[in-house]
């Protein structure tokens, strides 16, 4: 009965980690897997017991904006097209992850909505049994045009990035025009019934920290969740501690204007700390990746546009699922590779000062 219970979990751990049964029972990861015998997500459970049921897939490295905090001014070296995942490869990998327990997939990039077959990809993902949420993070530039078709294809959650409510500043931060298109996209998402429409706002000192209260007002009559994101370091984005505005500082600013601000409860795996001004339709949240990291409850994995599995946004260890796929690996072999990478995931990121010194890809190549 014991053997039946541990079944694939044991095989996986014995084969990929070369553990004995005794070691399995005494190791932290082994004990966790035995106690939570759930074959669906065993390969996606790391040695700290974190179950990864959320996958972010980057659909492209290209973008129609050039946000200062995301990509270097000189641009990034793009991967040749033949090295990027094809649509079929994306679907094959997504299917595998969903079979192993992933319940939410977010499409990101670069700018995911510039991939010509994005509607088709959403439609194919929608057919995967067990997948509960298909989300997209977009800069909103092509949203008004595409959202009706994306919705019909099965897209059920949306995050739109907007860092300023001042049109001229938009052009400075994004190094391109587009403010009105993004605003139109936000209103389209509301009109089509997305609730909440999440608005991602990276807060940087000297850029937009003076707009916090304006963004709070933006939630007054609209069903938005404006998410203030702490500025994170990536290669080429000139991160600097002084430019980062911490959660505590942002909260203080908002509370000075709105002392009655209410804290909202949230899921354990949530990366957001959410608040609401009483009687406002929308809410605000803070993504505190730098000042109060949420590594302990991290449930995310990432696949880059060139097919690398990245188990941590701030870790530089990557494994090429594309190469395994293209060399004809079986489903079982792929699952072993994924399981081994998840098993190596570190307890937490190295801390903001260390990660600012580390080699990592620019954000645009990781897929946010
Ligand atoms: N192009 C899409 C967009 O902008 O929404 C999707 C990709 S973008 C890399 C995903 C998210 O990462 C965006 O909300 C963006 O604001 C955020 N982001 C990019 N660079 C960041 C940084 N250095 N610190 C914090 N957030 C960042
Ligand atoms: Fe493009 Fe998004 Fe990066 Fe801005 S944050 S440059 S929109 S990928």
Image (cartoon, rainbow, N blue to C red):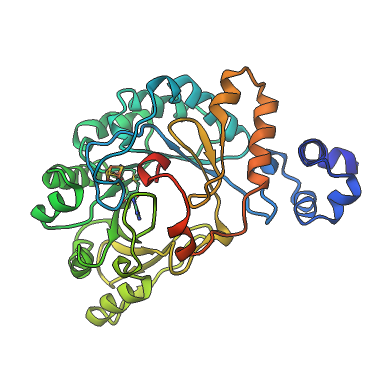
Residue beneath the point at 43% across and 59% down? 356
Q: Quadrant of residue 95?
A: top right
Query: Is 232 positioned to the left or the right of 279 in the image?
Result: right
Q: Position of residue 84 (x, y in %)?
A: 43, 25
Q: Quadrant of residue 222?
A: bottom left
In this view, the residue farthest toward the left is 168
Q: Position of residue 187 (x, y in %)?
A: 19, 46
Q: Position of residue 172 (x, y in %)?
A: 14, 52
Q: Is residue 142 above or below residue 139?
A: above
Residue beneath the point at 67% across and 49% down? 46
Q: Position of residue 349 (x, y in %)?
A: 54, 59
Query: Is 87 positioned to the left or the right of 36 in the image?
Result: left
Foreground residue among 128 and 288: 288
Query: Is 344 positioned to the left or the right of 91 in the image?
Result: right
Q: How many marks?
A: 0
Foreground residue among 53 and 24: 24
Q: Quadrant of residue 318?
A: top right
Q: Is residue 201 above or below residue 278?
A: above
Q: Is residue 333 above or below residue 251?
A: above
Foreground residue among 42 and 237: 237
- Ligand 2, seen in the image, is in the quarter at top left
- Quadrant placement of the N terminus: top right
Query: Is 237 positioned to the left or the right of 289 in the image?
Result: left
């Amino acid at each position: 009965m014991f053997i039946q219970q541990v079944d694939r979990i044991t095989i996986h751990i014995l084969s990929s980690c070369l553990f004995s049964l005794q070691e399995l029972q005494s190791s932290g990861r082994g004990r966790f897997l035995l106690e939570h015998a759930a074959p669906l997500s065993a390969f996606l459970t790391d040695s700290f017991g974190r179950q990864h049921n959320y996958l972010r897939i980057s659909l492209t490295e290209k973008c129609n904006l050039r946000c200062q905090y995301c990509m270097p001014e000189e641009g990034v070296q793009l991967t040749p097209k033949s090295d990027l995942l094809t649509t079929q490869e994306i679907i094959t990998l997504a299917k595998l992850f969903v079979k192993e327990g992933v319940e939410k997939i977010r499409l990101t990039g670069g700018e995911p909505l510039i991939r010509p077959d994005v509607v088709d990809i959403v439609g194919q993902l929608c057919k995967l049994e067990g997948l509960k949420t298909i989300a997209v993070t977009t800069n909103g530039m092509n949203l008004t045009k595409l959202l009706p078709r994306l919705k019909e294809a099965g897209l059920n959650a949306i995050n739109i990035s907007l860092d300023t409510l001042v049109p001229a500043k938009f052009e400075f931060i994004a190094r391109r025009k587009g403010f009105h298109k993004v605003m139109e996209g936000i209103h389209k998402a509301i009109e089509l019934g997305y609730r909440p429409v999440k608005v991602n706002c990276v807060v940087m000192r000297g850029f937009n920290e003076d707009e916090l209260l304006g963004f709070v007002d933006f939630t007054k009559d609209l069903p938005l969740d404006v998410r203030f994101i702490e500025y994170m370091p990536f290669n080429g984005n000139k991160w600097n501690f002084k430019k980062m505005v911490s959660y505590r500082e942002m909260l203080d600013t908002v509370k000075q204007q709105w002392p009655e601000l209410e804290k909202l409860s949230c899921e354990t795996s949530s990366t957001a700390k959410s608040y609401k001004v009483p009687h406002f339709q929308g809410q605000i949240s803070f993504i505190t990746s730098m000042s109060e990291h949420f590594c302990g409850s991290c449930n995310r994995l990432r696949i880059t546009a060139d097919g690398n599995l990245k188990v941590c946004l701030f870790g530089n260890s990557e494994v090429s699922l594309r190469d395994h796929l293209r060399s004809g690996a079986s489903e079982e072999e792929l699952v072993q590779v994924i399981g081994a990478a998840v098993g190596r995931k570190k307890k937490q990121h190295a801390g903001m000062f260390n990660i600012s010194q580390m080699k990592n890809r620019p954000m645009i190549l990781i897929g946010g």
